[in-house]
Image (cartoon, rainbow, N blue to C red):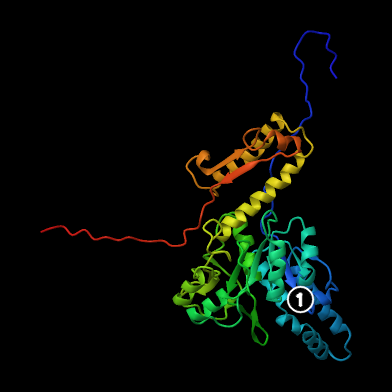
């Protein structure tokens, strides 16, 4: 405390509420596995969450199995190696192991694996998880967990594996879309077909959701969560089935009440590309596209995290102004990066808070501080139409 005796100007630094909203990670997946999974059992992790930060950590599990088998066999070098190779051979067909491999190859960062049966209790404890990945686990059970975990305010998005069998006609596509296999929700997307990866015995079939999760992470990092994870190459795998234009059309734009299926296609001169960006709620104009839903998930998560600093602060105009300023700075930065539509901030977003604006006196008396945020999210250019005309000069 200054000694105010001499006339002059004194500088103080009072402590007050300081708010800033940081952009969090948007693609941190939790891979599901069924109870009989090989990788989890070798790690003795069949009933808990395990975190991986790189493929090196995953491959270390199979390397340990190889080393143990090699050391446990008596005989010459060739005999030991054959025993070790036989011990790790099942990993080539393990859906979780191969899904993680494709995830990291395609640009994924740190992730988790968790038993599907305990998803509803284990996943909420992971405060940085943003994606749920089926990774070949049981579709019906995964759908039940997604319905419970993904919804308004929960900021999770799920990736389903499409049918393993070929969808070779639009009729087959519509049959899958009309069934209750996949929930009708904007918080999930499904990808078809399954993929093949090279192995010592030829090629193994792998679910697509792991590779797609890696693409999500890569696109988020390079472009932003608002960029559709589509027209992007999948590395290290090829589609099992070839998708025709007729099947693609039926998958992408289903009949009313149907569910969109995002296809993976290999075109001449390109690698396999993700060729769709629709959620399982294709009938919804607001939440039809994956990047729109995921942008709002990310914004909700970031703003919610920052707003915890305002808990128990005075519910009055000075606090409201600090909150409004922090949120407006965050969404303005989204607009500057191209995540929002509009030639001006007024066209791109709004942030409202205050008595008579978002709150009544009764709300304030009950301890409620209500902030309303509106975002004009960009949509992907899904159909590019070239209109060509010919002007004929009269003779």
| Residue 385 percent location from the top left of the image | 38, 61
* Residue at image point 77% right, 62% down: 123
Q: Which residue is mark 1?
A: 34
> Which of the 4 image quarters holds residue 148?
bottom right
Q: Going by the picture, which residue comes out furthest to the front?
A: 362
Q: Which of the two residues, 330 or 43, is positioned nearer the viewer here?
A: 330
Q: Is residue 295 above or below residue 383?
A: above
Q: Is residue 262 visible?
A: yes
**Classed neighbour count for the residue bearing mark 1: other residues with Cα under 10 Å, few (<14), some (14–19), many (≥20):** many
Which image quadrant is residue 260 in? bottom right
Q: Position of residue 86 (x, y in %)?
A: 78, 87
Q: Is residue 9 above or below residue 351?
A: above
Task: Point out residue 383 in the picture as x, y percentages from the top left corner.
Answer: 43, 62
8 sits left or right of 104 in the view = right
Residue at the (59%, 54%) spot, across then down:
224
Examine the image and state in which quarter residue 4 appears. Answer: top right
Q: Position of residue 234 (x, y in %)?
A: 58, 70
Inspect this view and state whether residue 98 appears. no
Residue visible at 70% across and 33% down in the picture: 361
Quarter of the N terminus within the rendering: top right
Which quadrant of the rendered structure holds the C terminus?
Answer: bottom left
Q: Secondary structure at mark 1?
A: loop
How many numbered discs sit on the rendered protein? Answer: 1
> Image point 84% across, 17% down: which residue?
2
């Amino acid at each position: 405390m200054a000694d105010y005796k001499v006339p002059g100007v004194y500088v103080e630094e009072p402590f007050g509420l300081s708010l800033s909203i940081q952009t969090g990670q948007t693609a941190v997946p939790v891979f599901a596995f069924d109870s009989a999974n090989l990788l989890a059992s070798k790690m003795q992790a069949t009933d808990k969450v395990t975190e991986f930060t790189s493929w090196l950590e995953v491959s270390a599990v199979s390397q340990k199995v190889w080393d143990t088998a090699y050391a446990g066999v008596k005989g010459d070098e060739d005999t030991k190696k054959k025993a070790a190779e036989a011990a790790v051979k099942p990993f080539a067909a393990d859906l979780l192991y191969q899904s993680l491999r494709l995830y990291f190859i395609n640009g994924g960062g740190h992730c988790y694996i968790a038993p599907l049966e305990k998803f509803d209790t284990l996943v909420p404890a992971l405060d940085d998880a943003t994606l749920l990945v089926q990774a070949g686990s049981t579709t019906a059970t995964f759908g039940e967990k997604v319905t419970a975990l993904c919804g308004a305010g929960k900021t999770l998005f799920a990736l389903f594996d499409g049918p393993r069998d070929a969808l070779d006609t639009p009729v087959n596509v519509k049959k899958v879309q009309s069934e209750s296999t996949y929930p009708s929700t904007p918080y999930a997307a499904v990808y078809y077909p399954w993929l093949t990866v090279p192995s010592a015995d030829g090629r193994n079939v792998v679910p697509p959701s792991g590779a797609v999760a890696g693409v999500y992470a890569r696109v988020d990092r390079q472009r932003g969560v608002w960029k559709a994870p589509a027209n992007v190459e999948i590395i290290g795998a090829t589609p099992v089935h070839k998708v025709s234009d007729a099947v693609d059309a039926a998958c992408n734009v289903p009949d009313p009440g149907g569910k969109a299926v995002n296809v993976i296609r290999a075109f001449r001169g390109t690698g396999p590309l993700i060729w769709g960006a629709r959620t399982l709620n294709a009938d919804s104009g607001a939440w039809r596209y994956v990047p729109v839903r995921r942008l709002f998930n990310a914004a909700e998560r970031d703003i919610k995290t920052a707003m915890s600093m305002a808990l128990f602060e005075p519910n009055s105009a000075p606090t409201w102004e600090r909150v409004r300023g922090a949120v407006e700075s965050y969404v303005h930065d989204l607009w500057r990066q191209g995540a929002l539509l509009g030639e001006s901030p007024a066209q791109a977003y709004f942030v409202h808070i205050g008595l008579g604006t978002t709150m009544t006196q009764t709300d304030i008396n009950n301890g409620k501080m209500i902030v309303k945020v509106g975002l004009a999210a960009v949509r992907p250019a899904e159909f590019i139409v070239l209109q060509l005309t010919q002007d004929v000069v009269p003779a």
